[in-house]
Every structure is written in C-alpha cells, then in structure tokens.
Amino acid sequence: MSNNQPQADSEIHEDQLLNFLVNVLTGAFTLDFGENAEIDPEDIFEVLVGATADGTSISSLCEKSEDAPSGNDVLYHLRTKFDLETVESTGNALLQQDVLDTLPQQVEVVADLHLRPYYGDEDETDGLYYSEAKAGTTAFHAYATLYARVNNKRYTLAVRRLTDGDTASDVLSEFLGLVSNFDFDVKAVYLDSGFYDGKCLTLLQAHNFAYIVPVIKWGSTIKNELSTGWSREITHDLTTSYGENEWTVEFPVMIDCTYKNGRYGEHGVARHGYAVDALFVDEPRQARSHYSKRFGIEASYRLSESTIISTTTQDPTRRLLFVVLSLLIQNVWRYLHWEYVATPRRGGRRLWWWPFEEFVDMVTRAAWTALAVRRAVPANRLPDDRFHR
C-alpha cells in the first residue's frame, strides 16, 4: 500500500463476522427454549451460519464438531420452532435490514424465477411447483427473488416460495406492491422471460414503471418478426384474461440484431426481442445493452448455490430458511463491504478488495473454530518423515 493511501482505522476479524451473522439471526427469530434446555438459539444459528458458509449439511457439520450440539437436536428445533409464514416474513425483513439504508435514491429492480429440480417420490409432491420439463422433471422447489441493482452491486430485497397454481403475475403483483412502499425511486424493472405475459405487462403499465422484458415467440406474428429483417422497433400486443374479463395489452418491442460470427459454431443473424417501455432506451441496441446488466443477477444466484445448506429434506419451511440464509450472507457481505470496509472519499467510496469467496472462507473458519471442528483424524500408525518439514 502506498504511503499516500488512507490507512484503515480498525479491523474486522473473522470471529466478528460470525458474531454479526449470529446476532442478526438471534435478534430476528424468537425461539422459545425451556429453562433446563441444553441448547440455546445462538447454538442453533452458529451451526446454521457455519453450514451455510461451508455449503455442507447440518448433520455433517455437527458430527465432526466437538462443541456443536447434536445434528438431531438442531434438526428437531428447526422442525418444531420454525413455521413457513414466519420464515418468509422474517426472512424478507432480514434481507431488507441495513440494506435499504445503504441504497441510493434511485435503483434498478430485477425479479427472477428460480426452479430447483425435484426428483423424489411422486407421492410426496405437495407444495411443489410444476412447470415445463427441465433437467428431466416437471416438479420443482421454486422461488421468486426480488433484487435491487446499484452500480453492479446486487442486494436481495425479498424471496417468495412458489407452489402449484402460483402465476408470474401473482408474484409480480406482490413484488411491485413491495417496491412501491420503499423510499427509493425505481429507474427500471428488469424481468426474466418467465414474466412475459399480458397480465405482467398490464401490471407494469399500471404502476407506471419503466421496464425491459425479453419476448417469447408466442404466435406466428412475433415469430415472423424475429426471423427476418434488421434492428427495429415494432408494436405488439397480447390478449389475456382474468375470470370472465378479457383484454389486449399493447406494448413496444425492440428487436436487436447482431451477427453470430461463428460464436458457439453458429453463423447468420441473432435476433433478440424485448418488450421495452423506458425513456432512456432510444434504440434496440440500447435495450439489449441495458438488459444484459440483469445477468449479474445470475451471478448472485450462482453464489447462493455455493453457499446453501446441503439437504435432502422436502420440508418447505426448512428449504426456504436455507435459501434465505444463502441470500442473507451475500447481503451482509455487501453491506459490511460498503459500510465498514470501503473508505469514504470525495467522489464516492473506495471499495477495497474483499471478494465474496474470501468473506465466506473467513466465516467458515470462524465457525469451525467456534464449533471446534475436527482438524485431525485417527491414524493406526505414526506419521513418518513425509508428514514433517
């Protein structure tokens, strides 16, 4: 570090990161234990944070930890002291905690649908979500997530579990209602293709939000438009119904065309259609450019996949809790990075190098230390010289 760079006033140690996460969870969830209980809420959440950061199962972590409660005890309390409604409401409050205070006056909002394939017993599919076949199944543990995007930083604001019968418009209606109650202004809403239908577009227009949504080739008209010609703007419509009511929603579609140039072994013209209603988008190229920002959200999802408790349970409450924890750990990292690690300076804060992977490793090591995770294994003979330096 050069001498002219400002020095940090303090440090955050890995055990303090673990304390922060455990304190956040302990303060949010009220768990009632008897006076003579051999386990307390901090024990539960210490295991949950450790298993989340390590991407392992609760049973596995407890089995190799001397100071952890038994895995059966932890799982018992998860079954008996958490209910689905509380996990969803408290989980969303946790995701918004601290984050809302760090967001600027204007943000971009992104909503996604995530489907986790289910391959279990066909007789145990209550509460699952059914969709078109993907990865060899039509049954999924499904979740919708709402994010705020600010300068390539992504903050999860809400997660919602989906069950059979839920529609994209149901989810979007809830999310847009939530966003309308926040203090920040919405620059634009970016949705994945799962939200491309007449009801969702009607909702976006009713809330008067700028939006960009990729178009699906439904019907011969849009198929023809996306098969010929060069970049242009057209007007398209979708007919939809609700009960006995039927209406047609009309919207602009920008078609952006590029040459494939042998990418992925393909040649010719690639045409991308987007339903767009945004003043800052003047031409199709801009529609594709702005929508590509959304792909950073996929990175958030991949990070959550690497930091989620491993489980085979079909219990929707525990599965949702584990998803909330995986998203919360990202939010906490971004919040701490911005509020405690970044250096205030004229023109904006300086974000010191602190990747998510390092943050997770620090939390994992702290949990291993706190739980006294096994660092040696029994051996039936003494290590020879090859084990020494």
Image (spheres, grey):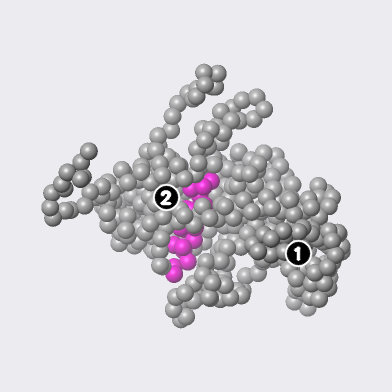
Residue shown at the point (67%, 59%) measured from the top left: 263
Q: Quick check: 131 above or below 96?
A: below
| Secondary structure beneath label 1 | loop
Q: State the residue in front, 291 or 62.
A: 291
Q: Nearer the viewer, mark 1 or mark 2?
A: 1
- Tell me how far mark 1 sits from mark 2, CA to CA: 45 Å
* Amino acid at the residue labelled 1: Gly
The reply to whether the magenta stretch includes residue 190 is no
Residue 219 % position (x, y): 79, 75
Asked whether the residues under the numbered discs 1 and 2 touch, taking CB atoms below 8 Å apart as contact, a structural biologist would say no
* Quarter occupied by residue 366: top left
> What residue sits right under mark 1 in the picture?
268
Residue 209: percent from the left, percent from the top?
77, 53
Q: Earlier in the sequence, mark 1 or mark 2?
A: 2
The boundaries of the magenta stretch are 314-331
Left or right of residue 283, residue 112 in this image: left
Determine whether, in the image, residue 379 is placed left or right of residue 371. Answer: left
Residue 379 appears left or right of 127: left
For badge 2, the amino acid type reads Ala
